Every structure is written in structure tokens, then in C-alpha cells.
Image (cartoon, rainbow, N blue to C red):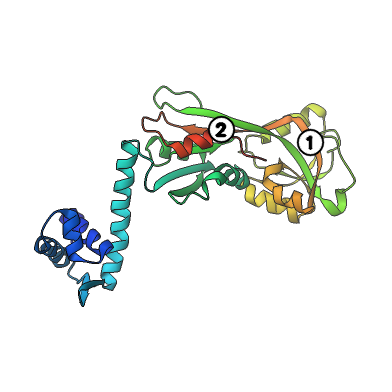
């Protein structure tokens, strides 16, 4: 059976019967006869070459095949309802918010940003990460609603984008508490020869740090450079080296006293942006997030 042979009208009738568990109720809801509903479902079963229901008294029970088909029908028609609600400006029902974030962005920052939505039962979150250009391409194709980034995107009339500044954070030098609990360093003056882990070359703040060290004539001993902030967090926690990163990356370790802040530099700032396309159809949940700066 090919997709173009699937009758979605039949599938819709099946979906309503499966949700209600009763032919008569489904027929009343659909403003048609019980025999018409039965006929639609029978034709769907013939196309699929398998039974979708078995009768138990006056009720219908889904077969294994029926359970599988229902799962797909829920997605198909649930997204259809969501689409209509979005187009008509309604907030009722389930809303799907699709968030992309660049791979070099702290997952703690991302979680802090979406935290107000986690208790909303009407919202389904889709979260993914990747390279900025790939995420922007998906945004322009309406496969994402917003991209979180730590750099802006160049202006390009052929791809209109809105880049909203969310805030910034001073970059810190952190180290293991057992060694650095009562000590502090100047950054970058005291870093010459110090074992250090840094964000990878693709990270927005790496060029800032390298330029700062070059201007002061210091050369830290590079032990690791890591693009992924989740991995850099583990390196900071377990290596014993000093690590340059935004404190939001290791917020839990700092609160627990596993790591301590050894130095900060106001010359190093990570900036956070929310990138969207011009929206004809408003998403209230997204607009609320765009107006707030997450706590570090």
C-alpha cells in the first residue's frame, strides 16, 4: 500500500471511534449514521489488510494493529488541530515549541531559559542542537521556532531574521575547590604556564580569550579545548585543571562547592541571542520567553 492510497477521511473516522470507544457516539459527533462510520472503518481495514477493532459486548476494543494506527493518528490529527489553532490565534489545546541551540551553548543556560514552560501541560517541547548555519536553515524552513545562539547572524536580505539580545555573562576561571578554595588569580596576568581547559576554537568567546592573553604576553599551558559545553563541564569537574567558561555551565558544581571561581574578567563576555523569523502567527509561550533573561 502506498501513501497516496491511504484515505485520511477513513483514518479520521477511525480516530474518533478509537477515542470514544463507541460507534454510536462517534456517529453523533460526526453528524452521520452509524452504518456510514462502520463502512469507513471497514474500508480502512481492507486497505491495511488487518482488523483494527474487536467487539466486546457493546464496546469496541482496539487490536494490536489498531493501537499502532491510533498512535500515528493521534500525531497526525493532533498536529492538525495545533496547526489550526496557531493559524487562528488560539492558545487552547497542545502547542509545540521547537527550540534549536548551537552546540557550543550551555545546556544549563538553555534549561534556565525554558524552565518557565516545564510545568505547562499544554506545551510539548522539541529541543535540538547543532551548528548555527544548519539550525538557521531549519528555522527558515519553519522546522524550528527559535534558535538560541551565542553569536549573531550576518544581515542578509534574502533570509530575513530577527536576532534578539537576551543578555550577557562575564566569563570566569574556575578550579577544583580542594586546591583553589582560598586563592584567586588575575585573568589573564597570572595564567602564564597554568594548566588550562578552554572552549574550542568555534566558541564565540575563544577568540576573545586568546586576544586577551596575547595582549598581556602570557601563555597558559593548554590541556584541552572542548566545543561541547556539557563535556567542558565534566572536564572542569574532574580534571583538576583551571577552566575558562561561563559560570552557568558549572552552576551546580559551584553551588555544591566542588568548584570555585578563581578569577573573572569583565573583558570576556558571552552574549546570548534568540533568533527567529518574522512571525505572522504569534506564539505566546515563545514571546514570554523572549522577554526574560534567565538567571545564571
Residue at screen point 60% across, 44% down: 112
Farthest-out residue, bottom? 57
Q: Which residue is mark 1?
A: 264
Question: Which quadrant of the figure has residue 144?
Answer: top left
Residue 86 is left or right of residue 288, and the answer is left
Image: 162 above or below 201? above
In this rendering, does residue 139 appear at all?
A: yes
Residue 219 is left or right of residue 41, and the answer is right
Residue at screen point 69% across, 54% down: 234
In this rendering, does residue 7 appear at all?
A: no
Query: Measured from the top left, where is residue 273 in percent x and y?
Result: 56, 33
Query: Measured from the top left, where is residue 281 in percent x and y?
Result: 36, 33
| Label 1, residues with CA under 10 Å away: few <14, some 14-19, many ≥20 | many
Q: Between marks 1 and 2, how big is the CA–CA gap? A: 22 Å
Residue 243 - label: none
Question: Which quadrant of the figure has residue 75?
Answer: bottom left
Image: 34 above or below 117? below
Residue 273 - label: 2
Amino acid at each position: 500500500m502506498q501513501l497516496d492510497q491511504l484515505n485520511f477521511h477513513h483514518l479520521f473516522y477511525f480516530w474518533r471511534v478509537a477515542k470514544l470507544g463507541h460507534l454510536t457516539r462517534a456517529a453523533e459527533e460526526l453528524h452521520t449514521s452509524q452504518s456510514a462510520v462502520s463502512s469507513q472503518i471497514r474500508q480502512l481495514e481492507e486497505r491495511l489488510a488487518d482488523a483494527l477493532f474487536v467487539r466486546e459486548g457493546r464496546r469496541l476494543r482496539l487490536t494490536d494493529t489498531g493501537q499502532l494506527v491510533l498512535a500515528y493518528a493521534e500525531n497526525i490529527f493532533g498536529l492538525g488541530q495545533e496547526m489550526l489553532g496557531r493559524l487562528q490565534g488560539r492558545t487552547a489545546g497542545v502547542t509545540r515549541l521547537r527550540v534549536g541551540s548551537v552546540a557550543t551553548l550551555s545546556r544549563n543556560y538553555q534549561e534556565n531559559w525554558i524552565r518557565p514552560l516545564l510545568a505547562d501541560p499544554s506545551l510539548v517541547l522539541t529541543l535540538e542542537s547543532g551548528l548555527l548555519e544548519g539550525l538557521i536553515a531549519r528555522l527558515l524552513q519553519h522546522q524550528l521556532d527559535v534558535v538560541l545562539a551565542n553569536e549573531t547572524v550576518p544581515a542578509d536580505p534574502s533570509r530575513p531574521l530577527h536576532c534578539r539580545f537576551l543578555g550577557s555573562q562575564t566569563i570566569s576561571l574556575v578550579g577544583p575547590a580542594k586546591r583553589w578554595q582560598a586563592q584567586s588569580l588575575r585573568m589573564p596576568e597570572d595564567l602564564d604556564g597554568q594548566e588550562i581547559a578552554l572552549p574550542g576554537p568555534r566558541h564565540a568567546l575563544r577568540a576573545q580569550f586568546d586576544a586577551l592573553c596575547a595582549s598581556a604576553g602570557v601563555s597558559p599551558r593548554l590541556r584541552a579545548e572542548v566545543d561541547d559545553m556539557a563535556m567542558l563541564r565534566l572536564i572542569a569537574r574532574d580534571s583538576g585543571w583551571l577552566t575558562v567558561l561561563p559560570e552557568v555551565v558549572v552552576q551546580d558544581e559551584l553551588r555544591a562547592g566542588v568548584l570555585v571561581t578563581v578569577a573573572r574578567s569583565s573583558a570576556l563576555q558571552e552574549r546570548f541571542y534568540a533568533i527567529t523569523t518574522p512571525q505572522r502567527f504569534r506564539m505566546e509561550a515563545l514571546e514570554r520567553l523572549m522577554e526574560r533573561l534567565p538567571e545564571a
